[in-house]
Image (cartoon, rainbow, N blue to C red):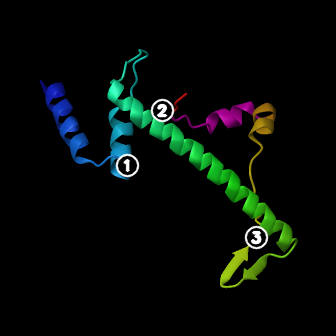
Amino acid sequence: MRKITDFIKKKEKEVNLPFGSDECGKFLKETYKDTLNEVVVLDDGLYEKIEKYNSIVDNINKLEKEKKIIEHIIQSEMREYETAFCKDKKITWKKVIKNSIDTKRLKIDYPEIIKNYTKTSTSRTFRMK
């Protein structure tokens, strides 16, 4: 009986969280973190949303490419300078130094050490084809 009560409470909470909010995303990830290796057929009414999603992804990709082109044009004009101005806009392109660990080499040279410090996490990846 407790499982049914918990399920109903989760469903009530899900209805109250607006889709697109961080809270809804956290709730869905937590509620459905366990998976079933089975196939579900979704309602045909979702097809329009899926098409819209794909269109949005295409537009984002086009905009990201256009953004990168503009960045490259500006960077080619800035050359080695870190700061530039154009009218009221300040543009910076600064050097960043980042230290990282070569985990591939560490696994080869010290497999026992890396095993002691490896942390495993589980998540679900959302994709559409």
Q: CA distance from mark 2 to mark 3?
A: 35 Å
Report crowding for label 2: few under 14, some 14 to 19, many 20 or more residues within 10 A (C-alpha): few
Mark 3 = which residue? 93
CA–CA distance in space, label 1 to label 3: 33 Å
Classify 10 Å Cα crowding around label 1: few (below 14), some (14-19), many (20 and above). few
Tell me if label 1 and label 3 are in contact, CB under 8 Å: no
Q: Which residue is mark 2?
A: 124
How crowded pointer 3 is (Cα within 10 Å; few <14, some 14-19, many 20+) is rated as: some
Q: Secondary structure at mark 2?
A: loop
Which residue is pictured at 73% across the width and 81% down the height?
86
Cα gap from disc 2 to disc 1, whole angstroms? 17 Å
User: Is tag 2's residue or tag 1's residue first in the polypeptide sequence?
Assistant: 1
Which of pointers 2 and 1 indicates the residue nearer the eye?
Answer: 1
Residue at point 70%, 37% (across, down): 113
Q: How many marks?
A: 3
Which residue occupies the foreground of this view, 125 or 90? Answer: 90
Q: Position of residue 56 (x, y in %)?
A: 52, 45
Region rendered in magenta: 110-121
Q: Earlier in the sequence, mark 2 or mark 3?
A: 3
The residue at the far bottom in this view is: 88
Residue at (74, 63) in percent of width and height = 71
- Which image quarter: residue 4? top left
Q: Where does residue 60 sit, x and y in percent of width and height?
A: 58, 49
* Disc nearest the viewer among 1 and 3: 1
Q: Amino acid at mark 1?
A: Gly
